[in-house]
Image: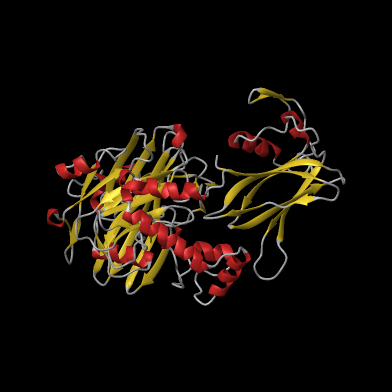
């Protein structure tokens, strides 16, 4: 945008430079977007108005978005407002924005439309009784909508959608929730959203929503929040279409087993649960503790994420993209292709190297599933929300601390191993010698060195991930390593007047330590003496989660 002689690039902090001007055609529908005007405000910021047009034959639909842009060009998506033809305050821009020959103040924003507005509370006593104990926020009710051939209409006959933020954990802290329905639907809008997401045969359940979740407890910042949507009984395959504010396009926000974000639908309870991480990839608000998510609910034929094995928990066992009977996580771990049904031998070869087979793992999983389904009360599953169950599965995969203490003789070495499952993890790995003296060890190794390997399953030697001798001189992230030691509870290598009630004054600079981000795989840590010495060494592996 231009301000006098100055040209300012508009930038989205998460995605880079933004271009609002485009035109494209798909299946006879013409879509176009254009930035129309910019007005500087008294505080030095700018208001930018963008027009979107959809055309199909004689049908034309126009919508407007107003953005706030900082003095140096940073786009503030949190302030985005949506308007229809007669709703724009054109006097702000001193221009005839909608080209009707007049400059008028306009009437209302679409966020004020009473026929589609979200309302606090619920008239359904059954909903209140059932969900008040699991709701961590206020409960909202939204009307579902139906679409006639040429206009939108709210429909009480279609039922209502109930929405709230689910309780995460046994405690209950206050969560703020604000929902605005910023746009309705038309045939053209539905066609555009379907085109964006690459799906067909969908019908809208809700208006286009823009909601914000505010987390009051700083300890919960950066965590995944879970929003429950109770859809009308009989709804088939609900789809959560999420809007990317940088591009304006919608996409099917299916659950991702690695990031633990996306939506999961429980057909038995008519509950669609959406998981989004605060300040994560899909949070449209950069402020820590505030989660913003523009989206719309659809009903359609698209496949929803589900508990496909029927064990009551959506986890990695529910994902087998190529249908070969081997879960995606295991295929990735073995170095196989989760989309190729012909490479099962890769996984079998990997498991044979561990003394296992897939049939053994499958049998164990089936026995566990049958036990859980037969005795749900024994496992207390009915006491927990879907998110709590998924958190438990994720926690069960976590490596808390793997360690081995060995007395090495001349030329000796020790090679403990560990496995990273589920998703990429940050790991603190140490081979400690001199500092063991503070723990009462008589003959600690004076200069241990370590090499971290990642196993390969293609017949080639393992990959070398890191070689560390002296932890301070061989790393450029020493302060991060020290912080990781503190957060995991590992004893310090630097001098400390007291640790767990005893003095720790040895300044250990010759032990080996590294803070590494590791992909899914099997790893080993080979430890020996760097100078041919002998003595006791402690090898430790911690998962760093803070």
Q: Quadrant of residue 125?
A: top left
376 left or right, relative to 350: left
Query: Taking the image as drawn, is residue 312 in sight?
Result: no
Q: How is the image coloured?
A: secondary structure
In depth, the one of 13 and 291 nearer the eye is 291
473 left or right, relative to 70: right
500 left or right, relative to 533: left
Which residue is depicted at the point 38% across and 64% down?
Answer: 196
Which residue is depicted at the point 73% across and 27% down?
Answer: 495
Query: Where is residue 447 shown, x and y percent of the image?
Result: 82, 41
448 left or right, relative to 256: right
Query: Where is residue 472 shown, x and y percent of the image?
Result: 76, 39
Tell me: residue 491, above or below residue 332.
above
In depth, the one of 20 and 540 nearer the eye is 540
Query: Where is residue 195 shown, x and y percent of the image?
Result: 35, 67
For the C terminus, give its image quadrant. top right
- Residue that sits furthest to the bottom in the current view: 342
Tell me: residue 512, above or below residue 55.
above
Q: How many marks?
A: 0
- Residue that sits furthest to the left in the current view: 157
Query: Where is residue 415 shown, x and y percent of the image?
Result: 72, 52
Query: Taking the image as drawn, is residue 134 in sight?
Result: yes
Q: Quadrant of residue 289?
A: top left
In depth, the one of 262 and 329 nearer the eye is 329
In depth, the one of 59 and 420 nearer the eye is 420
């Amino acid at each position: 945008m231009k301000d006098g002689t100055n040209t300012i690039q508009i930038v989205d902090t998460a995605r880079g430079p933004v271009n609002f001007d485009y035109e494209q055609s798909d299946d006879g529908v013409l879509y176009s977007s254009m930035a129309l005007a910019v007005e500087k405000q008294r505080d030095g910021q700018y208001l930018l108005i963008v027009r979107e047009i959809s055309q199909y034959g004689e049908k034309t639909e126009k919508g407007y978005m107003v953005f706030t842009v900082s003095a140096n060009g940073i786009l503030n998506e949190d302030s985005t407002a949506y308007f229809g033809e007669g709703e724009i305050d054109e006097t702000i821009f001193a221009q005839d924005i909608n080209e009707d020959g007049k400059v008028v103040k306009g009437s209302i924003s679409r966020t004020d439309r009473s026929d589609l507005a979200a309302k606090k509370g619920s008239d359904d006593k059954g909903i209140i009784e059932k969900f008040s104990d699991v709701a961590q926020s206020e409960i909202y009710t939204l009307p579902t909508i139906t679409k006639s051939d040429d206009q939108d209409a709210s429909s009480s006959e279609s039922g209502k959608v109930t929405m709230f933020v689910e309780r995460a954990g046994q405690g209950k802290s206050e969560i703020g929730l604000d929902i605005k329905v910023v746009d309705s639907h038309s045939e053209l809008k539905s066609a555009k959203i379907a085109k964006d997401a690459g799906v067909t045969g969908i019908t809208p359940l809700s208006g286009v929503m823009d909601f914000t979740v505010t987390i009051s407890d700083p300890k919960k910042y950066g965590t995944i929040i879970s929003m429950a949507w109770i859809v009308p009984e009989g709804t088939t395959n609900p789809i959560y279409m999420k809007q990317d504010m940088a591009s304006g396009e919608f996409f099917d926000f299916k659950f991702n087993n690695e990031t633990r974000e996306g939506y999961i639908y429980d057909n038995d309870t008519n509950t669609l649960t959406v998981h989004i991480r605060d300040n994560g990839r899909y949070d449209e608000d950069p402020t820590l503790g505030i989660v913003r998510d523009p989206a719309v609910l659809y009903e359609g034929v698209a496949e929803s994420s589900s508990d496909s094995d029927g064990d009551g928990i959506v986890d990695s066992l529910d994902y087998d993209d190529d249908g070969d009977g081997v879960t995606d996580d295991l295929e990735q771990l073995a170095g196989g292709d989760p989309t190729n049904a012909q490479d099962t031998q890769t996984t079998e070869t990997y498991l044979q190297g561990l003394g296992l087979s897939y049939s053994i793992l499958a049998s164990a999983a089936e026995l566990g599933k049958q036990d859980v389904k037969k005795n749900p009360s024994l496992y207390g599953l009915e006491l927990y929300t879907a998110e709590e169950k998924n958190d438990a599965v994720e926690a069960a995969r976590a490596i808390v601390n793997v360690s081995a203490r060995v007395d090495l003789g001349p030329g000796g070495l020790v090679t403990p191993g560990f496995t990273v499952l589920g998703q990429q993890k940050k790991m603190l790995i140490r081979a400690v010698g001199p500092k063991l003296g503070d723990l009462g060890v008589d003959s600690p190794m004076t200069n241990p060195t370590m090499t971290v390997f990642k196993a390969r399953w293609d017949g080639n030697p393992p990959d070398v991930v890191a070689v560390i001798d002296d932890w301070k001189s061989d790393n450029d992230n020493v302060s991060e390593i020290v912080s990781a030691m503190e957060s995991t509870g590992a004893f310090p290598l630097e001098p400390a007047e007291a640790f767990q009630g005893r003095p720790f004054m040895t300044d250990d600079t010759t032990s080996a330590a590294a803070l590494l981000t590791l992909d899914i795989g099997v790893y080993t840590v080979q430890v020996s003496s760097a100078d041919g010495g002998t003595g006791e060494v402690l090898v430790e592996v911690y998962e760093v989660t803070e």
